[in-house]
């Protein structure tokens, strides 16, 4: 029981460290962008956390068969994931700003289509969680691998560590979206607020993307 | 003849002494990569300060920061099973110890430094 609680606590400590700050800001803006739909924000946050947890569990289980490869895998992830995430965030940012158009079939924005787009956004939250977890920071590498070694690959410990790393982000996104939603309804301008929230998310993605690229190339 | 024996004896014991001094050496490594983070810089500074403040008269305790992204230093990852920024104590006989609690203690400077100092003292005692 103590090991399980400790895994969640170490996850929370990881999340509030300075190192994952940039990816946390991007995640909060992405999760909280649908300010008019609190349940959507919450579901999106839970899926983001599930994505993180999934990554740590999959990696942990895979490495539990080959503990001696931990140094090489950790080094590779810490050195190379920024090359993947940086450009990807920039492209996603430009797509959200409608500068790059996705070549999707033309739909009128019927309720059904809107539902499809929303589901795509939820899938995006899951993938974003997985991707950001894969961008190991020194602090996440320290706590995740020590958890993995001490628990000898206990799936529950690994999954709970992942949940811990997502919790502060989700809590912050939900509170932020709730406040923004209240504010927008006071001004009766929810649609306008959502449009700006989407643009802000896009700009944050582009800035964070360039930050990651700059960090590995400069 | 006696003079020659004396010179040889002095040279022999001198060499023995030098060799002993060398084998008593303990490296306090701080391993980092090209990308530095705020917490990592803090850990490096705390470790260096702890060594300098507590072992300044002991020339055998040497702090050294090592960049494991440099090809010549890559072997340290395997040698000491490193998976993140770490502080490792190592002697010249191949004994080493990873002070792996640094990440839990970095929020408290005094506890962090005490952990480093205790770690070095324990490592030194274990050698005797």
Image (cartoon, helix red, strand yellow):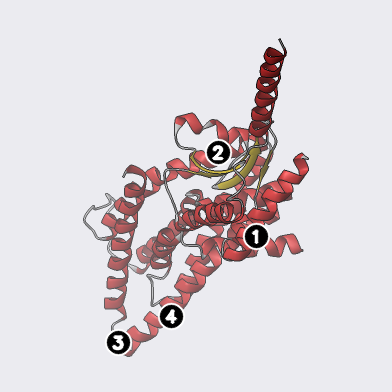
According to the picture, the residue beneath numbered tag 1 turns out to be B114
- Residue tagged by mark 2? A73
Which mark lies nearer to you, 1 or 2? 1
Q: Answer whether labels 1 and 2 touch (C-beta < 8 Å).
A: no
> Residue visible at 67% across and 36% down?
B24
Does B126 sit left or right of A57 as displayed? right
Residue A146 disc label = none
Frontmost of labels 2 and 3 is 2
Q: CA distance from mark 3 to mark 1?
A: 58 Å
Position of the N terminus of chain B by quadrant: top right
Instruction: Give the SS element for disc 4.
Output: helix
Can you see residue B14? yes
**Dot 4 corresponds to which residue?**
A178
Residue under mark 3: which chain is it in? A
Task: Calculate the distance from the C-alpha at mark 2 to the C-alpha at mark 4.
Answer: 39 Å
Where residue A115 appears, as percent x and y from the top left, is 40, 65
Q: In this view of the protein, which residue sits in the foreground, A74 or B48?
A: B48
Q: Nearer the viewer, residue A112 or B126?
A: B126
Give the camera-side residue of A86 and A197. A86
Instruction: Identify the residue position indicated by label 3 in the image.
Output: A188
Secondary-structure class at tag 1: helix
Which of A180/A16 is in front?
Answer: A16
Question: Of the residues tagged 1 and 4, which is closer to the observer?
Answer: 1
Q: Are marks 2 and 3 in contact (CB under 8 Å)?
A: no
Q: In 3D space, how far apart are the residues under numbered discs 3 and 4 (Cα atoms)?
A: 15 Å
In the rendered view, tell whether residue B94 sits above or below residue A124. Answer: above
**Mark whose residue sits in front, 3 or 4:** 4
Report the chain holding disc 2: A
**Going by the image, does A104 lie left or right of B78?**
left
Name the image quarter holding residue A205.
bottom left
Pointer 4 local density, CA inside 10 Å: few below 14, some 14–19, many at least 20? some
């Amino acid at each position: 029981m103590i090991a399980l609680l400790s895994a969640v606590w170490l996850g929370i400590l990881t999340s509030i460290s300075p190192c994952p700050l940039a990816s946390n800001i991007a995640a909060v803006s992405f999760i909280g962008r649908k300010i008019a739909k609190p349940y959507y924000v919450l579901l999106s946050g839970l899926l983001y956390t599930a994505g993180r947890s999934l990554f740590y569990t999959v990696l942990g289980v895979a490495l539990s068969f080959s503990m001696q490869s931990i140094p090489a895998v950790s080094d590779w992830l810490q050195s190379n994931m920024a090359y993947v995430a940086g450009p990807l965030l920039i492209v996603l940012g430009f797509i959200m700003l409608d500068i790059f158009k996705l070549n999707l079939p033309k739909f009128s924005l019927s309720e059904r289509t809107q539902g499809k787009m929303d589901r795509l956004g939820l899938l995006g939250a899951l993938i974003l969680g997985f991707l950001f977890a894969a961008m190991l920071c020194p602090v996440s590498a320290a706590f995740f691998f020590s958890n993995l070694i001490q628990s000898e690959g206990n799936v529950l410990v690994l999954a709970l560590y992942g949940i811990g790393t997502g919790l502060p982000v989700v809590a912050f996104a939900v509170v932020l979206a709730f406040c923004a939603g209240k504010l927008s309804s006071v001004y009766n301008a929810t649609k306008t607020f959502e449009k700006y929230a989407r643009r802000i998310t896009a700009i944050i993605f582009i800035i964070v993307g360039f930050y990651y690229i700059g960090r590995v190339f400069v | 003849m006696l003079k020659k024996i004396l010179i040889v004896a002095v040279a022999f014991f001198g060499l023995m002494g030098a060799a002993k001094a060398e084998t008593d050496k303990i490296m306090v490594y701080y391993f980092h990569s090209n990308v530095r983070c705020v917490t990592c810089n803090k850990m490096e500074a705390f470790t260096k300060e702890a060594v300098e403040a507590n072992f300044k008269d002991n020339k055998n305790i040497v702090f050294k920061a090592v960049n494991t992204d440099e090809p010549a230093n890559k072997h340290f990852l395997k040698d000491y099973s490193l998976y993140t920024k770490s502080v490792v104590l190592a002697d010249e006989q191949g004994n080493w110890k990873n002070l792996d609690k640094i990440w839990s203690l970095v929020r408290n400077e005094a506890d962090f430094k005490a952990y480093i100092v205790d770690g070095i003292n324990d490592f030194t005692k274990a050698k005797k």
